[in-house]
Image (cartoon, rainbow, N blue to C red):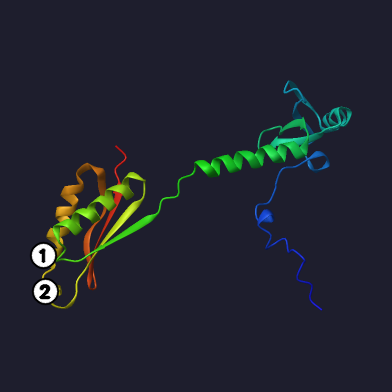
Amino acid sequence: MVNFNTTNSSTNPANTERDTTRVNQQINSSTVRLIDAEGEMVGVVPLKVALAKAMEAGLDLIEVSPNASPPVCKILDYGKYKYEAQKRRNEAKKKQKVIEIKEIKIRPGIDDHDYDVKLKSIVRFLDEGDKVRVTLRFRGREMMHHDLGMQLLERMRTDLGDKAKIEQSPRLEGRQMVMALAPNKS
């Protein structure tokens, strides 16, 4: 019988990021640069002395900078350290802006009002920091008039002015002409 309530560490999202912080007996250096529980620099001491001071304080010895020579270790509560690190990661994730690519589809015979509405949408997307892909679709005999499509995309480029920079100039891909725009940082 299969038990469906078990959690596999490979599928558990909390375990996807390995914790490589060494604590107490996991530290494998003979000497460490020690920072005590109050944040005071003690100096370079043997690992056994650092572990003894951590035990005396009732806290853990945590390797905060393993690449330093000797590694920097701090005396503090490991649970609190992990909690603070998670808070910092979540805060960094909140501040991160995911750039999306929005797509605007138009036709060569677009009316002036419809063109203005599409242009306003493009400006709004660019102001939000998103990239925009303008797709001009040709149907039937419109394929004979690529120059009309190119003129329309050039008009759009001039109407946007300095709000957008051209990431990809208009080019023909099958039955459609594509142009990519990015927000202008200045």
Label drawn at residue 91: none
Residue 66 in view: no
Residue 92 location, x and y as percent?
55, 41
Indicate the amino acid at tag 2: Met
Q: Mark 2 = which residue?
A: 144
Q: CA distance from mark 1 to mark 2?
A: 9 Å
Name the foreground residue: 84 vs 125.
125
Tell me residue 103's x, y (percent).
32, 60
Image coordinates for residue 99, horizontal then vertical, percent: 41, 50
Q: Residue at x 31, y 54 (%)?
A: 132
> In terms of depth relative to the viewer, which is nearer, 43 or 155?
155
| Mark 2 closeness class: few <14, some 14–19, many ≥20 residues within 10 Å | few
- List x then y, in percent, for residue 91: 57, 40
Element under disc 2: helix
Q: Mark 1 falls on what kind of element? A: helix
Query: 98 left or right of 160?
Result: right
Mark 1 neighbour density, 10 Å: few (under 14) some (14–19) many (20 or more): few
Please identify the residue farthest to the front as the structure is shown.
Answer: 113
Q: In the image, what residue type sits under mark 1?
A: Asp
Residue 106 in view in this figure: yes
Q: Which mark is residue 147?
A: 1
Between 64 and 5, the one lying in front of the other is 5
